[in-house]
Image (cartoon, grey):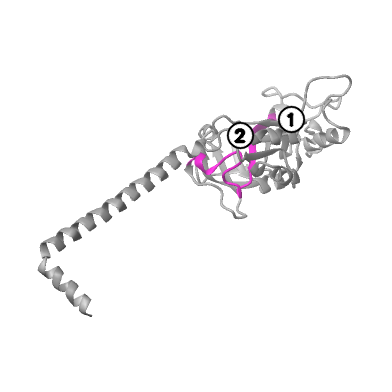
Amino acid sequence: MFFITYMLAELRRRSGRTVLTALGLAVGVGLVVTVNALSTGLDRAQAEVLEPLTGVGTDVSVSRPIDFSPSGSGGFPSLSEEERRQLQGENGGGRFGLGNLGEPGDRFSRDQFVSTAQLSFPATEVDQIRRIDGVSAAAGGLTLNSIHIEGTVPEENASGGFIPGQQPGAGGGPGLESINASNLSVSGVDQRKEELGAITPGQIASGRYFRSTDAREAILNESYASRENLAVGNTVELGGKRFTVVGIAQTPLGGQSSDVYVKLGQLQAVSDRVGRVNTVYVRAESSDEVGNVAASRARWTVRP
């Protein structure tokens, strides 16, 4: 108790020095807090600006391309017999028949999903690649062409072929000119891996990224959205299912863009490719580890 009384007495007796010391301590503490705040803000701003470059040299895509070069009697020398049957089945035999669409004059609408130049493979390959030494993350993707054909079933001629078209005023039923076809490229994105995939949250120009729900959502490439006069809140149709547009994305730098991006599982379902992917997006721990991924998939293509 004596020491406390003595201390208070000294502080009152030397009030000028006490105030000066208190002000010095306050200024020192304030400077430390200010410097720490400025340093933290600078680090955060730097990280935000450099975020698009964090994956340079470490993000790669792994796919199984199809070799279209002719060799002997086989059309695809790099594919096994099983893979050729798989490719034919995934592309519907490469044909779109008009004979089973109904009677001449009936309206029809069909969607068909075909592969680009990549052979699909089981999604379990994603887990295998994820376990490679030096790989920090991996996500599957599926890129397809969606072909939409609609119109009126044309008339057949006497030889069993379809009539190319009717001249105005000639009468008769519809010809092939009554059929309209359109196609767009669509990519399935694993929304659980936001940092990997054909589209990422950082590329959204307006709207938002996918949410982890069962709702059918779509993100459009900004050039496709402008061409088709579509915006956030509109809908697009794929495989007879309607998807609500939730975002507009800028074209990815250095990568091949698609017209429409949807959730991977939903694209697999509407295209009858459940459990299949044709691209794996990989993030290596460092650029030196990319070689391990390429070596483990010697028959595949690994590209930055």
Viewer-closest of 137 and 32 = 32
State which quadrant residue 183 falls in: top right
Residue 185 locus on image (x, y percent): 64, 34
Given the image, on which type of amino acid does mark 2 rest? Ser
Q: Amino acid at mark 1?
A: Pro
- Kindly tell me whether residue 148 is visible in this rendering: no
In the depicted structure, whether residue 111 falls above or below residue 11: above
Q: Are marks 1 and 2 in contact (CB under 8 Å)?
A: no
Q: CA distance from mark 1 to mark 2?
A: 23 Å
x then y, percent, for residue 290: 65, 34
Residue 196: in magenta span: yes
Location of the C terminus by quadrant is top right
Residue identified by numbered label 1: 65
Q: Residue at point 15% right, 68% down?
A: 11
Relative image position of residue 194 (x, y in whole percent): 57, 46
> Tag 2 or tag 1, which sits nearer the N-term?
1
Depth check, front residue: 189 or 295:
295
Would you call the spot at circle 2 few (<14 residues within 10 Å), some (14-19), or many (20 or more)? some
Residue 95: give x, y in percent of width and height.
79, 31
Q: Can residue 267 be seen at all in this image of the molecule? A: yes
**Residue 173 lies within the magenta run:** no
Callout in the foreground (1, 2): 2
Question: In the rendered image, which quarter contains the N terminus?
Answer: bottom left
Q: Which residue is mark 2?
A: 287
Residue at the far bottom in the pictured view: 1
Q: Which residues are magenta?
A: 178-205
